[in-house]
Each structure stands twice: as C-alpha cells, then as structure tokens.
Amino acid sequence: MVELTIDGTKIRTVEGTTVLEAAGEMGIVIPTLCYYPGLSPYGACRVCMVEVVKNNRSSLEASCTLPVEQGQVILTNSERVRKARKLIVELLLASCPNSKTLQDMASNMGINKIRFKIKDRGCILCGLCVRYCKEQMQSGGIGFIGRGTSRKVSTAFDVTPEECRNCGGCEWICPVCERACTAGNLIDGLCGGCQNLAPVETCPICTGCSESVGMQGHKVY
Amino acid sequence: MKNECDVVEVIINKYGGNHDSVIAILQDIQSEYHYLPETALRVVAKNLELPLIQVYGVATFFKAFSLKPRGEHLIKLCVGTACHVRGAQPALDEVKRQLGIEAGETTEDMMFTLETVNCLGACALGPIMVVGEEYHGEMSPKKIKKILSDYKKATRSRRHDEIRVGT
C-alpha cells in the first residue's frame, strides 16, 4: 500500500495503480480522452494532465500512465493544470473540429476560442481504435503507419486484413468519427450548437445565461 | 515468388524467429532485394506470429526501409544547410539531369535511386553524395558526371557478364 495526497486529501491505495485510477476511487473526475477502462493506458492525448508537486517544484504529468508513489502530492485542478488542459483541447480541436466529444470537452472547460489554424485531419492519433482492435478483439488488423506528421492509422497495404471481423469496434470507440459534430459553420473553431446539452453546472449568479460554464462556474469579482 | 519465400525464411531462421529482431530481419531482406516486397512482409508476419500491420508499421516508420522497388545503387545527396551553402543545389540538378529522374524516384533500368537527405555529418566535405556505401565529397556538376558514368559503366559490364554466365 502507498499513501499519497490528491487535492489535499490523503488516500491509501495499492501499489501499481495509476494516479487517474486513484483519483477515480476518491470521486475526483479527471477529464480523459485516450484512456478507456480495459485497454492499456497510452498517454497520447495528454488531456488527463495533473500537477505533481515535489520539493517545491511541480511538473505536469499524464495521470493515466503515472503510477502512484509513496508521499506523492497531486493537484488535479490547479490553475496550471486547467490552463494546460485547455491548450491541449484547443490543439486537438484544431486538428479535429468535427469531433463532438472534443467540442463537449471544450465547452466544459470554458474554451471560447481556438487560437490555432484549423486543419481537419479527421484523427487525433489517440490510438483507441488500435488498442481496441488489438487488446479487446485480439485481432490487430489496424495500426499506426508512418512517422511524424505523416503518422496515421491504417491497415497493412491499405487492404482489409484477414484478421478483421467487421466488428466495427474501431469506429464505435473513436472519439472523432463515432460522434461527429454536424454543425456547418464553426465560429472560432467551436460549434456551440450542442453546448447547452453538454453536462455543465448552471451558474448560480446569472441563471439562464446562454454561456456555458465549466466546473468552476463564472468567476466572481 | 516461391524462391523469395525461401530466402526470407532463411533470414528469419537466422535470427531464431524472435519478435525483437523484426528490424534486423527487415534490414537483411532489404539488402537482399533493395526494397521490402509485400510477400516478404507477409512471410515475416506469419513466421514471427505478429499481426501484419505491426511489421508494416515498422517498415513504414523508418525511412531506411522502402516498400517501392529501388535501384541497385542508392544515391543519397545531402541538401542540408552546410551542403546547400557549398552548392548542393547545382549538384542535385546535375544528378537529376544525368539520370532523368526526380528525388525519390528510380531510373527505369533499376540502376539508380535518388534520395535527398538533410545531413550526413560530413559537412566539411560538402556537398556530399553517397552512392551505396561510398562517400564522395566536394561534389561539382563535373565530378558528378564522371562518378555516375563510372558507376553506369561498371554496372553495365557486370550485368552483361551475368547474362553471359546465365546463358
């Protein structure tokens, strides 16, 4: 058993669990994208960033691949973490503006502008489909090919592999193609169409405002 | 293609059919055929009991591997900063003109493949050209013409000999 502190609360957990799982046990929600229970953690999307405080210094780590350590001090919702997450979701949205999962996440985080050039690549390389195919379906029909900017998910030689059983799991698990955002014109890279359908807390100060508020609500001055 | 499978299987057996030796196996196949044929990759995947995509992923990840047939001599011409300053562009133009191909292409007689690289770590010798394993430094259009014609001559006479021996 190891003892660590998450958001000021001490928790004892089994060695070998990840910080994300430990936080989940406590009921602390860390937004995730490329993490899926049952699949191996991958650490590709970096949405689950947390701040690890050590010797008066802190570093940002992906909590889904970070194993718990004795005496670790974790902050899951500090200013620095929120800022980093926002930037990451912005970057992901800039490469996949039609993903409903990402758009929802953006509205939950209170992002109101994408500052980057939007180029629809149709894939965020989270590796969910690849891991699902390999680990859940024991198939291994799809995988990553190429490197750097030309890296993409594909089948070998662009033909349907023998291993493929047409289960459709890769499409089902994909955060981009499964729940495509159908908004035609995106303002500042954000659709806003289903923003109000996103599970957000209503702001107690200005009830009925159309603006979405994140977990923190509006800032009160 | 039967013959090809046998050659690949010999290479695989040399490494004991270990999963870790995929890169070494692919390198050996590449030095045998100058590229990675599709059948060879399928044989590797089958014998190592790996999904084909995993072998394919490795083959596409490294620039050293090619899935397209390449010529006998691989010409790597450096167009990095130091070589560029020292005149890599005229040298590249000369190679293209001599062979009649663009960078990344192979001549029709399967003799040369031209590739540009960004640094070979021999900037003092720039512009540098590597043909197969041989390094040629301080390339000028004139020198390139001579070197390429030497290679052409040598390869042609060797091919002739091979045909003669074959018949």
Image (cartoon, rainbow, N blue to C red):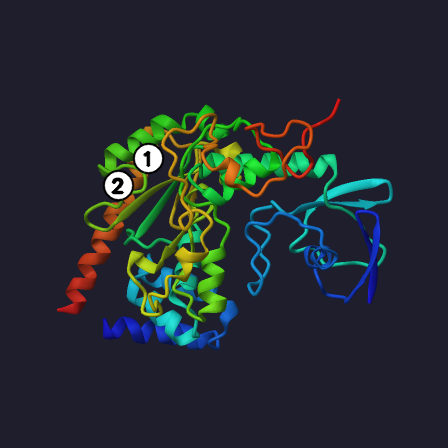
Q: Which residue is mark 1?
A: B144
Question: Which quadrant of the figure contains the N terminus of chain B?
Answer: bottom left
Q: Chain of mark 1?
A: B
In the displayed structure, B155 sits above or below A189; it is: below
Q: Position of residue A89 (x, y in %)?
A: 56, 38
Question: Which quadrant of the figure contains the C terminus of chain B?
Answer: bottom left
Quick check: can you spot residue B122?
no
Q: Residue furthest front?
A: A207
Question: As shown in the figure, which amino acid type bears the numbered disc 1?
Answer: Ile
Q: Position of residue A31 (x, y in %)?
A: 62, 47
Quick check: can you spot residue A37?
yes
In the displayed structure, A86 sits above or below B30; it is: above
Q: Nearer the viewer, residue A154 or A196?
A: A196
Tags 1 and 2 touching, CB below 8 Å: no
Residue B155's label in the rendered image is none
Q: Nearer the viewer, residue A176 or A161?
A: A176
Question: As shown in the figure, which amino acid type bears the numbered disc 2?
Answer: Ser
Q: Nearer the viewer, residue A137 or B59?
A: A137
- A138 displayed left or right of A71: left
Disc 1 to disc 2, how far (Cα)?
A: 8 Å
- A72 displayed left or right of B16: right
Residue B149's label in the rendered image is 2
Q: Secondary structure under badge 1?
A: helix
